[in-house]
Amino acid sequence: MLQSLHIQNYALISSLDMEFSRGLTTITGETGAGKSIL
């Protein structure tokens, strides 16, 4: 199970740290926000 994610200097993302809780996690955003890059 994915517990955390760290991305730095990749495509549109300069720096990102995410911690995931147990259960279902959804990622939403407007077109062009970078969801597909994750």
Image (cartoon, rainbow, N blue to C red):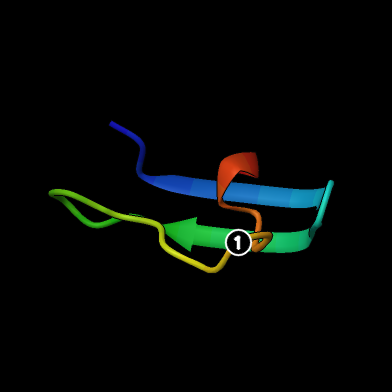
What secondary structure is found at the residue carrying circle 1?
A: loop
Q: Position of residue 17 (x, y in %)?
A: 58, 61
Determine whether, in the image, residue 32 is placed left or right of residue 21: right
Q: Residues within 10 Å of mark 1 (few under 14, many from 20)?
A: few
Quadrant of the snapshot with the N terminus: top left
Percent x, y of residue 23:
13, 49
Residue that extends furthest to the front in the rendered view of this protein: 31
Front one among 16 and 29 = 29
Q: Position of residue 15 (x, y in %)?
A: 75, 62
Q: Residue type at mark 1: give it.
A: Thr
**Residue 6 point in image, percent of width and height:** 62, 50
| Apparent side of residue 28 relative to residue 9 in the rendered image (left or right) | left
According to the picture, the residue beneath numbered tag 1 turns out to be 31
Q: Nearer the viewer, residue 8 or 26?
A: 26
Q: Quadrant of residue 2?
A: top left
Number of numbered discs: 1
Q: Residue furthest top?
A: 1
Q: Is 17 situated left or right of 26 in this image?
A: right
Q: Quadrant of residue 31?
A: bottom right
Residue 3, placed above or below residue 33: above
Quadrant where the C terminus sits is top right
Q: Residue furthest bottom?
A: 30
Residue at position x 84%, y 47% in the image? 11
Residue shown at the point (53%, 47%) measured from the top left: 5
Outermost residue, left side: 23
